[in-house]
Image (spheres, rainbow, N blue to C red):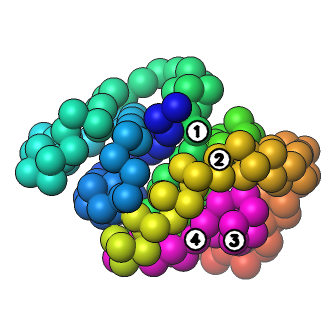
Amino acid sequence: EAPLFLFVGNGFERKGVPQLLRAFSRMQRRDAWLLIVGGDRRLAAAQQLARRLGIAERVRFAGAQKDVKPFYGAADAFALPTLYDPFPNAALEALACGLPLLVSNSCGTAELIVEGSNGFVGDALDENALAGALDRLAENSPILRQAARATAETLPLEAMSEKLMALYRQIGATAVVT
């Protein structure tokens, strides 16, 4: 069965959509699909790049969506080769849905990845390495999905909210009031 990779996000340039499209075009597997969910003012440029790379027939742009859960449910893996993102919700949602991740080393979620177990971490600007990681995700998706689910179970909402509140208190204690 053809693997389906999912990207969810806005801000295509910063989130690495051009790099993802180029990496996707360099994959060894030619039966894979890429679904890009999110709105962006650069949507037309991304669609044009997919056409130019000869992958437009295997890439779908779903635009902005109110409910992204069905997309996570349909996907085999999640890709976010962002140039910078401290801790993207979309990657956490993907893990919670049991999707293995391909994220960049400039993505905070990289800290949760055990290379080759629940996903892969790569350099957002190394499209050949990203393509190789996409191929490995496609080959090992069922095994990686189990590990991704296990990772999500270590991140209960209550523990994450406590950490967030502690951070807010720390920031509040050091804030200067004028």
Q: Residue at x 30, y 32 (%)?
A: 60
- 1 and 4 marks in contact (CB < 8 Å): no
| Amino acid under disc 4 | Val
Q: Residue at x 51, y 65 (%)?
A: 133
- 2 and 1 marks in contact (CB < 8 Å): yes
Which of the pair 91/122 is nearer the observer?
A: 122
Which of disc 4 and disc 3 is earlier in sequence?
Answer: 3
Q: Is residue 115 visible?
A: yes
Residue at disc 4, secondary structure: strand
Q: Dot 3 corresponds to which residue?
A: 115
The vertical placement of 163 against 141, above or below, is below
Q: Is residue 20 visible?
A: no
Q: Dot 1 corresponds to which residue?
A: 76
Q: CA distance from mark 1 to mark 3?
A: 17 Å
Determine whether, in the image, residue 169 is placed left or right of residue 102: right
Residue at disc 3, secondary structure: loop
Which of disc 3 and disc 2 is earlier in sequence?
Answer: 3
| Amino acid under disc 2 | Ser
